Image (tube, rainbow, N blue to C red):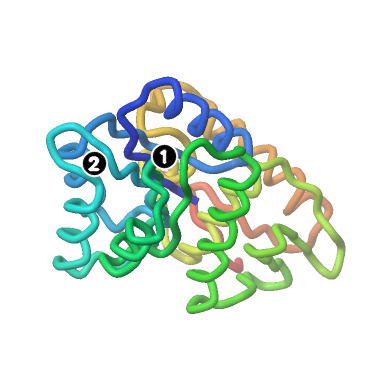
Amino acid sequence: MRLLLVEDDKKIASFIKKGLEEEGYAVDWAAEGETGFFMGQDEVYDLIILDVNLPHKDGLSILKNLRSRGIGTPVLLLTVRATIEDRVIGLDTGADDYLPKPFAFQELLARVRALLRRRAETEPPVLKVADLSLDPAKRKVFRGGQFIDLTSKEFSLLEYLMRNKERVVTRTMISEHVWDHNFDTSTNVIDVYVNYLRKKIDLGCQSRLIHTVRGVGYVIKEE
């Protein structure tokens, strides 16, 4: 899943970004309000983590403007202002959750998971292609009833392919949704991870599900 972090404190932003990426999320970072607002209008994000105190354009203004434009992406507000009044204003403006600073990363992670689960309730709970199934909430994958152990990045890649089943996705699309915004598309890392998935998903099975579209990208579908 792809998250947008809007935070002007570089130390805090680096801490959050690194921790979330280690958990398998792709994280884009904006260091000031105007950039964050511009990026937040792209509905490619599954969640926005938004600091309230930002230069150029504060978090509440960003949130209000996003909601007025019909952007329904879940938003988790971060702020040192933790009074009841502040929280009420943030939630009434359109925030989905509110986390005061300082905070433990594990609490942030738990709130991120909760918001993503809530959003997933409006989507199919389990993704399926033939006898392959992926449960985004439980982060489990099975093929033919057999559990498949995947790394965080392999899981994210497979989830993206399955959410776009029967649709060809380019390497650029994969890099933008599964890896970092600044990912070097000239490397062969994506091809390497697709091969990892093939060995775990298709090896030993009668039918292949992950297919290469030469010169374009990849697609997951029944043969």
Pointer 1 residue: 171
| Image position, residue 76 (x, y; %) | 42, 54
Q: Residue at x 46, y 46 (%)?
A: 100
| Image position, residue 180 (x, y; %) | 43, 33
Identify the image quadrant of residue 186.
Answer: top left
User: How many circles with numbers are drawn on the protein?
Assistant: 2
Q: In this view, does 177 lie to the left or right of 194?
A: left
Disc 2 to disc 1: CB gap under 8 Å: no
Disc marking residue 23: none
Q: Which residue is drawn at 61% across and 38% down?
A: 104
Instruction: Please tell me how crowded label 1 is: few (under 14), some (14-19), or many (20+) other residues with Cα within 10 Å.
Output: some
Q: Which of 158 and 73 is in front in this view?
A: 73
Q: Is residue 91 left or right of residue 201?
A: left
* Disc 2 to disc 1, C-alpha distance: 25 Å
Quarter occupied by the C terminus = bottom right
| Image position, residue 138 (x, y; %) | 72, 63
Say above or below: 175 vs 41: above
Q: Which residue is drawn at 73% across and 53% down?
A: 202
Q: Nearer the viewer, residue 99 or 144?
A: 99
| Image position, residue 97 (x, y; %) | 45, 60
> The residue under label 2 is which amino acid type?
Gly
Pointer 2 residue: 36
Instruction: Please tell me how crowded label 2 is: few (under 14), some (14-19), or many (20+) other residues with Cα within 10 Å.
Output: many
